[in-house]
Amino acid sequence: MAIQIATTDELDEAQRIVIAEVRYTAEHSAPCANLVEHFKLAQGEKQITVPKVGQAEADNLTDGQDITTSQAIGMTTTDLTTGEVGLKFILTDKLLRQSQPDLIRVVGRQGGDAMGRKMDTDIIALFSALNGGTTLGVADCTWTMAKLGSYMAYAKMQKFPKPISIVHHPYSIMDLVAAMTLTPSITYPMPHGYSEDLLRDFWKMTVNGIPLFEDGNIEPDGSDDAVGAIFSKSAMCVVESMAPTTERERDASLRAWEIVVVADYGCFELDDDYGAPITIDAAAPADLYTS
């Protein structure tokens, strides 16, 4: 559990004489939780078992003759459970008395941002294992429309169930946009089937019916390559036992309040065949600091 302690040493940052407005550390976009399946554990439940059945085959029949072959359901199951995630702030009485901003609201937003970022990165961590770990794309190679088309064709040939999404680093998406002759987010609206109020800030464009989303929480490696993914909503999931909750507890001897934020969830690969990682260059644009 991460712990942040606010003491009198921090008063100079919060008192009226120094600060006029609280400034928050900017958070990256975090679309992944809204692009995968969600399951909820009810009271008293320890895990969810998700079944999957195979394909059946239809045969040609002859009039008057019995059907001699039977089909197997081919059911497999995946067991999903949850684990606790959380963080704690300690706000001293002196800090609360002498601070200008409402620190309860400040740490509430910090905690919410942290929990959202944690879930997003937990889902991103699943990308590299999709498709048996076989990645599309290669390191040190920028996106083109031809490459994008090949990834989309792969997803459709592998019969990824709709909706299908692509999530990648903003620099990688920028390379693709630069290869196009128009600004897609201006020309085309977000496709139907997605929650616009949750995803419109992260959606960049839609190509051949598949939307592309930016996620700055994807971290490039030392060679400026990053791993995103193309996946069906059914490829991964979030199982939630308890949504993020905030609790305050008084510590009289410390003369402070403890603010604890806790959630109980798990992020899982649900179907390995319904997604694939995409490895592509995510280097900063060459003209980033030029006129």
Image (cartoon, grey):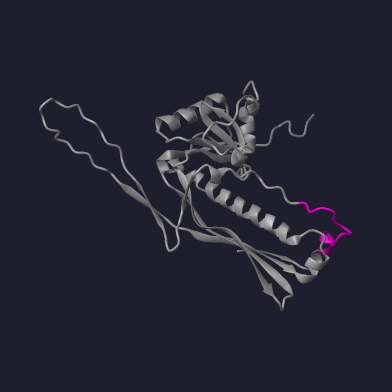
Q: Is 266 or 112 nearer to us in this picture?
A: 112
Q: Toward which corner of the image does residue 184 lie, by quadrant?
A: top right
Q: Position of residue 153 (x, y in %)?
A: 45, 28
Q: Quadrant of the N terminus?
A: bottom right
Compared across the picture, whether 167 is left or right of 233 comes to: right
Q: Is residue 21 magenta?
A: yes
Q: Quadrant of residue 189?
A: top right
Give the answer, above or below, for where 268 lies relative to 148.
below
Toward the viewer: 203 or 224?
203
Picture coordinates of residue 229 (x, y %)? 52, 39
Q: How many marks?
A: 0
Question: Picture quarter containing residue 243?
Answer: bottom right
User: Which x, y percent locates residue 103?
Assistant: 75, 61
In the image, residue 229 above or below residue 42:
above
- Considering every residue shown, the one lying at the far right of the view is 17
Q: Determine the residue positioned at 77% across, 34% down.
A: 289
Q: Main secondary structure of the magenta part?
A: loop
Q: Residue furthest left?
A: 64
Q: Is residue 270 magenta?
A: no
**First to last magenta residue range:** 11-23
**Image quadrant containing the C terminus:** top right
In x, y percent, where is residue 92? 75, 70
Taking the spot 77% from the left edge, 60% from the top edge, the residue there is: 102
